[in-house]
Image: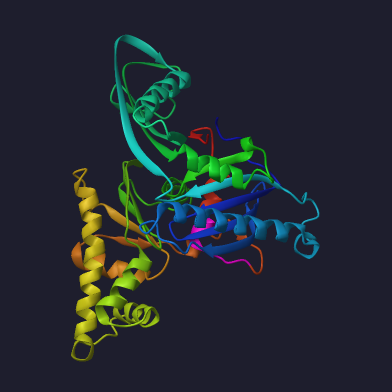
Amino acid sequence: MFSSNKVDNKIVLILDVQSSIVQGTLVIADHEIPKVIFTYSAEINIKSSNDNSSFVKSALVVIKEVIDSALRFIHHSDNINEFTHLHKKIHSVHYVLSSPWIVSDAKVLSKQFEKETEITQKYIIDLIDVDNKSSTKSNKLLQIIEQKIFDVKLNSYSVTDWEHKVSRNLEVSFTASTINSNMLDYFILQCKQIVNKNKIYFHSSLLLQFIGIEEVLEPGKNYCLIHVHGNNTDVSIVRKEACIFFGSYDFGTKDLIEEVAKETGNGLQAADSLLALYADNKLYNSENKKNIIAIEKISKQWLGELKGLLKEKELNIKPPTSVILNCSTHNACFVKVIKESIPGVSIYTLSLDDLLNRVSFNHLTDIKILTALYTIAIHSLNDNVVLK
């Protein structure tokens, strides 16, 4: 099923499900600029490494808490009175999933023809469907929930207007996201009381970030997008404006703080402060040599896992490839470790100033970069994005 046209003046619920937190966002899908009218966040307290079953149960409880908070907001007349044109109900739900909930793969399919052959959208979609069935054949529990076509090449040349063109060879670059079908059912079940199943959509966090960044910035043709969550880091590589790699590993901002706390013998709050001071170059060698060594050791472990993940696919980060970084906290610390280890690389951290001309926030909402980016991306979805 393809994305529908933009929905005007109706309420959309975005559920951002990460490794350690769930955030709910209510958005009025206005014709020009979407408006965020409510945000609510709750932490998932159990790490997946401890007990997967308990982790899933905890996440589902948190999702329900977030949904209930959104419904209370809608049904409270004082909150919604200023939007007199709205019905007091949610029109659709968009799940935004990060690892460990979803796996996204960047793929390239090639086809040679004996003679000039007409290329249609149906032909390309059917070609992708055959590949998807092959990919999920070995695991019946896997289900494709999202796809995006990045590039179509005819006779080795990228073509934007490829519908009904003829060619002797075809190359399609696309991404597909998969999820465990049991988990998919759990997510749908959480929303069964508020919307029909066909109004529940699923997205890859990294793919939405890519779409949002391409909407609001001019990032260049080659860059690496790094999103550091609480307990995971998600990575995508963009080459010639197409995602060629998606990956993730279990090391995030919470892990960084916890490991620094252990290494330095401090509490979590003190470790958090040490990281901020380190990023600002306010830890002096004579007084804090032990702390500096500990922070650099743990930071390089994070970077080592990043490099190891990319090395598996014979990829690396080096100029002219730039880095776009988005962290739940300690942006400056991650910028510092990348700059010191990869000389000459250009690093850009997303800011709200980049986004606020494409999305608005109601008073008393949390104004966050990811919230803005997801809202912009979902608002811009077109028929090249397969939702379900």
Query: Which quadrant of the view contains residue 201?
Result: top right
User: Residue 126: where, in percent of width, then height?
Assistant: 43, 20
The chosen color scheme is rainbow
The residue closer to the viewer here, 45 or 177, is 45
Is 208 on the left or on the right of 103, as rendered?
right
First to last magenta residue range: 365-372
Examine the rendered structure and indicate whether residue 294 appears above or below residue 46: below
Is 336 on the left or on the right of 42, as rendered?
left
The residue closer to the viewer here, 355 or 275, is 275
User: Residue 241: where, in percent of width, then height?
Assistant: 35, 42
Is 151 on the left or on the right of 189, as rendered?
left
Q: Is residue 32 magenta?
A: no
Image quarter of the N terminus: top right
User: Residue 99: where, in percent of width, then height?
Assistant: 40, 50
Q: Residue furthest bottom?
A: 287
Residue under the point 66% across and 57% down: 68
Query: Which quadrant of the view contains residue 287?
Result: bottom left
Q: Is residue 369 magenta?
A: yes
Residue under the point 29% across and 85% down: 282
